Amino acid sequence: DTGVSQDPRHKITKRGQNVTFRCDPISEHNRLYWYRQTLGQGPEFLTYFQNEAQLEKSRLLSDRFSAERPKGSFSTLEIQRTEQGDSAMYLCASSPRRGGSTGELFFGEGSRLTVL
Amino acid sequence: DQQVKQNSPSLSVQEGRISILNCDYTNSMFDYFLWYKKYPAEGPTFLISISSIKDKNEDGRFTVFLNKSAKHLSLHIVPSQPGDSAVYFCAASASTSGTYKYIFGTGTRLKVLA
């Protein structure tokens, strides 16, 4: 399977702990996105990378959140000192620049975080 | 500030009939629009897109219409099938503003009745 993969798929943690999610995009896709989705809402933009450069960050990305894409391939999203409000599905997507001919993002299956 | 709005949280349609899902936007800089389908516990799956230079794009049973003056787009599914039952999201981006992020609506849950 050469799609976008995310790990772990599920994470349960206690409030105050740190968590890290990993995303492996489709190879040769140079844009990588992180979104967050809560129940009844659409995906909310967090940040995106073009190669290793983080080009844009949402105001939703507080200083407890950090994302990296050190070699322009896989990416990590770390949440420090988790809070119950961080409970959500964290979605990663990749895109080959404008998404090829149709501009689409290819999403992974997401990492569900539950903060107790 | 919800720049992309899907005002109908749910829609039920009989199998074989047309499903029409609507999406409104407020940012006139948006120049690319996407529709995604999402099943529970899965990531969103791309369906169809449209550029602001067009007013219609068709792919099989799926057609997207764009009305720029009304800042409105719609997704038509004909004929609807039970397997189409899912949550549908529209998304928009404004690449001419130098950003490639996509803003998503809140989704419409479609239920196709057999």
Image (cartoon, helix red, strand yellow):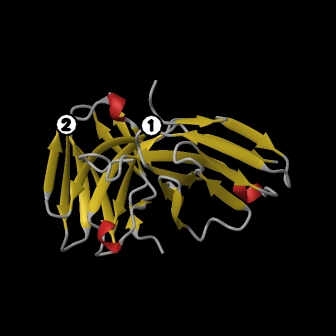
Q: Choose top left, top right, bottom left or bottom right for residue B102.
A: bottom left
* Residue B23 drawn at (x, y percent): 32, 60
Residue B111 percent across, percent down from the top left = 38, 39
Residue drawn at point x = 64 percent, y = 35 percent: A9
Front residue (pair A88, A99): A99
Can residue B55 be seen in this snapshot? yes
Image location (x, y in percent) of residue A101: 23, 46
Nearest the eye: B81 or A53:
A53
Residue at figure coordinates x 51%, y 35% from the top left: B42
Q: Amino acid at mark 1?
A: Ile
Badge 1 element:
loop
Local secondary structure at mark 2? loop
Q: Residue visible at 78% across and 58% down? A: A83
Residue that protrudes farthest toward the front in the picture: A71
The span from disc 1 to disc 2 (Cα, nearest Å) is 27 Å
Residue B91 to residue B88: above or below: below
The three-letter code of the residue at mark 2 reads Arg
* Residue in the image at 69% along x and 60% along y: A65
Q: Residue furthest top?
A: A1
Near-viewer residue (B63 or B108): B63
Q: Chain of mark 1?
A: A
Q: Which residue is mark 2?
A: B61
Q: Quadrant of the C terminus of chain B?
A: top left
In the rendered view, would you say B78 is above or below A35? above
Residue wearing tag 1: A26
Q: Check chain identity for marks 1 and 2: say if they share one.
A: no
Measured from the top left, where is residue A14 in percent x and y?
A: 85, 47
Nearest to the observer: residue B113 or residue A55: A55
Q: In the image, is B109 to the left or to the right of A13?
A: left
* Label annotation for residue A73: none
Q: Is residue B104 left or right of residue A47?
A: left
Q: Chain of mark 2?
A: B
